[in-house]
Image (cartoon, rainbow, N blue to C red):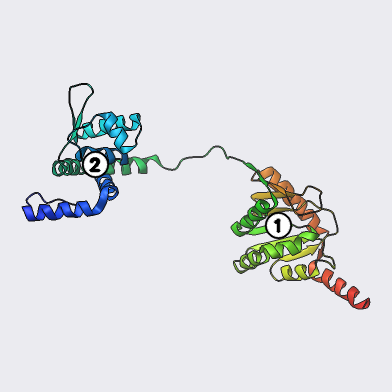
């Protein structure tokens, strides 16, 4: 809000009416727009409504601590928006609002000109600096606890894939992964040309889920007891652990350590080389089921 220096009495009364309609909270926000902190604006507004006040009076009225009040008063004194008496305890009075806005506007203009002058120096220094060389890479480990958290984290990793995903799933996980929405994520990845390869034991209990996954990923069958894990873009690995080795994962370990990620990737490739493609495995199960009906 801007007050006019040469406004007549009618205009001044209108400005005061607008201020009164704004209310203390909005006035404090307006004062912050002029460069005051929230605490300074509250103290200034309080002082403007009192003939004079001690720091204790202000702290009590504003519900601020003594330290916060002291810092706010110091800021107002530095701006020239408040005056302090020599008596003990010190009493403070505020500068009239018109003069206060004029001082704050001048200070804002001074800072703006100062920044304008610094801008060319900053640009020159920025250009001359060039690119920084990074000499070390930070490798991280993260433990994810709780089956729900493991589920959310695993799906988040799938979504983040840009190039490829390699995943080992327990046979009893396939139905659950469909329920969790992994099949929809794999469908979106497929539309983005992200290659997804999955290994699991495909059996008569999870054949429906396996068929659903085959629509979007390259699923292979391997009959081994395996710890489920996922590799994302060859840069991250998530190893999922269940308490009894059978149920849904209750904990997981995530890492971006290149040697560990590469070790899991090599293990996946070894299993992939001896696995059976999912389509032929499902045909076998369908033929067996038909022969026994």
Q: CA distance from mark 1 to mark 2?
A: 63 Å
- In the rendered image, residue 270, in percent from the top left (x then y), is placed at 79, 54
Q: Residue furthest right?
A: 292
User: Pointer 1: what residue?
Assistant: 166
Circles 1, 2 touching at the beta carbon (< 8 Å): no
- In the rendered image, residue 23, in percent from the top left (x then y), is placed at 26, 51
Q: Residues within 10 Å of mark 1 (few under 14, many from 20)?
A: many
Q: Secondary structure at mark 1?
A: strand
Q: Secondary structure at mark 2?
A: helix
In which image quadrant can residue 67 be found? top left
- In the rendered image, residue 111, in percent from the top left (x then y), is placed at 23, 41
Question: Of the residues under marks 1 and 2, which one precedes in the sequence?
Answer: 2
70 above or below 256?
above
Closest to the camera, between mark 1 and mark 2, is: 2
Q: Residues within 10 Å of mark 2 (few under 14, many from 20)?
A: some
In which image quadrant can residue 216 be found? bottom right
Q: Mark yes or no: residue 162 visible.
A: no
Quarter of the C terminus within the rendering: bottom right
Numbered circle sitting on residue 259: none
- In the rendered image, residue 36, in percent from the top left (x then y), is placed at 27, 41
Q: Residue at x 20, y 37 (%)?
A: 50
Q: Nearer the viewer, residue 272 or 112?
A: 112
User: Pointer 2: what residue?
Assistant: 45
> How many numbered circles does the render carry?
2
Q: Nearer the viewer, residue 108 or 238?
A: 108
Q: Residue at x 64, y 53 (%)?
A: 153
């Amino acid at each position: 809000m801007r007050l006019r220096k040469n406004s007549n009495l009618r205009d001044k009364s209108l400005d005061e009416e607008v201020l009164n309609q704004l209310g203390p909270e909005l006035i404090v926000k307006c004062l912050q727009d002029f460069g005051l902190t929230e605490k300074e604006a509250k103290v200034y507004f309080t002082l403007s409504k009192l003939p004079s006040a001690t720091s204790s009076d202000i702290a009590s009225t504003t519900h601020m601590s003594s330290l916060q009040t002291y810092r706010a008063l110091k800021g107002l004194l530095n701006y020239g928006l408040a005056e302090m008496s020599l008596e003990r305890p010190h009493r403070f009075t505020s500068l009239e609002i018109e003069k206060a806005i004029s001082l704050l506007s001048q200070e804002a203009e001074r800072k703006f000109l100062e920044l304008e002058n610094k801008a060319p120096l900053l640009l020159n220094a920025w250009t001359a600096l060039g690119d920084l060389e990074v000499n070390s890479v930070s490798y991280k480990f993260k433990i994810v606890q709780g089956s729900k958290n493991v589920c959310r984290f695993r799906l988040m990793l799938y979504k983040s894939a840009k190039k490829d995903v390699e995943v080992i799933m327990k046979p009893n996980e396939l139905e659950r992964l469909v329920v969790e929405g992994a099949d929809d994520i794999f469908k979106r990845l497929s539309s983005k040309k992200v290659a997804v390869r999955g290994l699991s034991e495909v059996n008569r209990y999870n054949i429906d889920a396996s068929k659903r996954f085959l629509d979007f990923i390259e699923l292979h069958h391997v009959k081994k007891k395996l710890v489920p894990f996922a590799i994302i873009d060859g840069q991250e690995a998530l190893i999922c652990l269940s308490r009894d080795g059978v149920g849904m994962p209750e904990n997981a370990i995530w890492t971006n350590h290149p040697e560990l990620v590469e070790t899991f990737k090599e293990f996946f490739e070894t299993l992939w080389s001896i696995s059976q493609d999912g389509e032929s495995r499902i045909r076998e199960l369908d033929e067996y089921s038909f022969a026994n009906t």
